[in-house]
Each structure stands twice: as C-alpha cells, then as structure tokens.
Image (tube, helix red, strand yellow):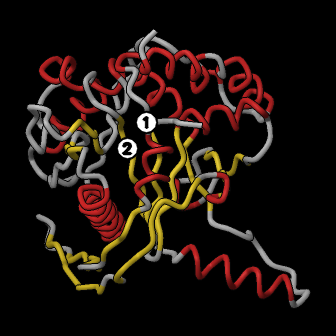
C-alpha cells in the first residue's frame, strides 16, 4: 500500500465516528454523505450578484495569507516546490463573466471535491508554479504526484498575543471568553474535502495564518478529532454566515511558524457598475519563519 493509499485508508476509517457524532449534534444528512460525487442540485443555484467591501477585504486577507505561507515554505523547505492550485480568480460578483465561472466552480466541486489552495511537489518535479486555471481532467494525473496539499485560512488576530492575554486574565482570577483561537472548518466543507482526498490520496492540511504566527493541523487529525467526540465544538459564527462550523482549538494542532514582520495596511476601493464605492483595507508586507521539522511532520501526517 502506498503512503497516499495508507493516508486515505486512515481517513476513511474515521467516517463512522464522524457521521455519528455530527448527526448527534443535529447536522443534516446532506452534509454527512461522504464518498463519491455530490448529488446534482435539486434547483438552480443562486448566483451572488454583488461583492461588497467585507467580501473584498476577506479575499484580500486570504490572498495575503497564501502569499506569505508560500514564500515561507520555499525558504524553509527548499526540497519542495509550491504550486498554486486553488482559484486565484479576481473576478467578483457583478462582473459579466462571474456567473459562468461561479457555476463552473460549483460543478467541479460537486464532481471532484474542493481544491486545496496549494500543492507541494518535490523540487525537481516538472510542474509550473500555477495550475489554478487548468481543469480537473488536465491536472488529475499531475496532482496525484504531489507530496502534500494545503488549505489556507487567514485571521485578523495575533494568536500568541490573544492567548497570552487570556492567560494573564485567568491567572488574575478573571472570567474570560474563549481561551484560544480556533481552527474553523465549515461542516459542509468536510464532504467536499473528503471527495477531493478520495480521488487524489494526497495528505492535506489546514493552515491558519495569524498576524504573528501560523498554526496547522492535518485533515486526518480533524476527522479523527470529530470521530472521537472530544476536542471540538459545533457553532454557527456570524463570520461564517451562521453556517455550522467545526471549532478546534489551535493548540490541538501545531504552531509551525512565527512572524518576522507584521504587515501594514493600505486602503483600496472598488466602484460597482451602479456607481457604489466599496472601500476596504489590504495587508501589505509582513513575513514568517517556519519550523521545517514541524511543518513537514504535519503536512505529511507523520506521527
């Protein structure tokens, strides 16, 4: 059995517990249908018609996080090549081409699963730096040669600062809120991440990029945590459009990086076809240093 096959077998073995525990928490059955293609939509999907400043700001944060992690990976792990795989499409809702691209993306995800943001290959692999515009059929055999895959998320917090303050408050006898930030994985994403892993057998990790640090957890550990029934909660945060979301404390994962520079921010704005001005801020600069040993251990699902 290959390393990838062994990895997916371990993931598959968690499904009984994952389904049972999420069902017990009231998650609807369509989010528990693991394996194979998704069902065609019963009705025509609703396509967003406009992108407002919050969406644009969140996208800018996500793009920044991917860039920072990619640069840090190249520096820390020169034996790997970082390849952009997830969408880098800058077309926002309201653009004439948006509807076509949006619906095509939904169909690809339904059939093949959710593309990770980044793929890691051995440094000598014959693959270009960006395959995000290439179709599933065009990249399938190539993707299966990847060493690891990464889903990147950004945060507006400094995680180390957050946890240090909570500790001081707790030591002073004060009642505090959440003691540490969380990895946040939408329940509806579990099925489509699993679908991609089922087809490709490439170890995939979830990286949360904070302004002062980077924490990571492998999806095998996310599924195993849910299957265990411990170490997570299911919440419906406003920032996730009140969708059911798995919350796992970041300390259940691994800190793989620390900031070497905090970004600055610049104001940008977009004018819609109707003449509305949406202003938002974009992070600029910054940097991270990764722990190569810890990063490799998480990304390759090594115990």
Q: Earlier in the sequence, mark 1 or mark 2?
A: 2
Residue 288: x percent and y percent? 35, 71
From the viewer's side, name the closer residue of 60 and 118. Answer: 118
- 65 left or right, relative to 157: left
Q: Which residue is mark 1?
A: 204
- Residue 176 lies in quadrant: bottom right
Examine the rendered structure and indicate whether residue 281 appears above or below residue 114. Answer: below
Residue 47: x percent and y percent? 29, 41
Tag 2, which secondary structure? strand
Q: Residue at x 80, y 29 (%)?
A: 24
- 290 left or right, relative to 99: right
Q: Residue at x 87, y 81 (%)?
A: 175
- 180 left or right, relative to 117: right
The quadrant the C terminus occupies is: top right
Tag 1, which secondary structure? strand
Residue 134's tag is none
- Residue 159 lies in quadrant: bottom right
Q: Are marks 1 and 2 in contact (CB under 8 Å)?
A: yes
Q: Which residue is mark 2?
A: 150
Q: Residue at x 74, y 70 (%)?
A: 179
Examine the rendered structure and indicate whether residue 236 appears above or below residue 272. Answer: above
- Residue 284 lies in quadrant: bottom left
Mark 1 vs mark 2, CA separation in Å:
5 Å
Residue 178: x percent and y percent? 73, 69
Q: Is residue 155 visible?
A: no
Classify mark 1: residues with Cα within 10 Å, few (<14), some (14-19) or many (20+).
many
Q: Is residue 159 visible?
A: yes
From the viewer's side, name the closer residue of 254 and 247. Answer: 254
């Amino acid at each position: 059995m290959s390393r990838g096959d062994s990895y997916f077998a371990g993931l598959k073995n968690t499904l009984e517990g994952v389904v049972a525990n999420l069902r017990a928490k009231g998650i609807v059955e369509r989010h528990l249908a693991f394996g194979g293609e998704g069902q065609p939509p019963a009705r025509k999907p609703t396509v967003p018609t406009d992108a407002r400043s919050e969406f644009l700001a969140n996208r800018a944060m996500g793009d920044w996080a991917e860039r920072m992690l990619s640069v840090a990976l190249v520096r820390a792990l020169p034996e790997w090549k970082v390849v952009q795989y997830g969408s880098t499409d800058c077309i926002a809702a309201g653009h004439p081409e948006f509807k076509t691209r949006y619906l095509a993306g939904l169909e690809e995800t339904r059939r093949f699963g959710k593309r990770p943001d980044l793929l890691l290959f051995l440094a000598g692999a014959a693959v270009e730096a960006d395959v995000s515009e290439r179709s599933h059929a065009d990249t399938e055999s190539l993707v299966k040669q990847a060493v690891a895959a990464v889903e990147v998320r950004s945060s507006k917090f400094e995680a180390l600062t957050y946890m240090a303050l909570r500790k001081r408050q707790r030591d002073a006898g004060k009642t505090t809120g959440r003691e540490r930030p969380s990895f946040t994985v939408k329940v509806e994403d579990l099925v489509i991440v699993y679908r991609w892993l089922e087809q490709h057998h490439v170890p995939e990790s979830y990286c949360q990029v904070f302004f002062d640090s980077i924490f990571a957890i492998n999806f095998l550990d996310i599924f195993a945590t849910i299957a265990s029934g411990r170490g997570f909660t299911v919440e419906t945060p406003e920032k996730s459009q009140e969708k059911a979301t798995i919350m796992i404390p970041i300390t259940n994962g691994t800190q793989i990086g620390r900031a070497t520079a905090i970004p600055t921010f610049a104001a940008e704005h977009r004018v819609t076809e109707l003449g509305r001005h949406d202003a938002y801020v974009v992070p600029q600069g910054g940097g991270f240093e990764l722990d190569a040993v810890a990063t490799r251990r998480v990304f390759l699902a090594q115990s």
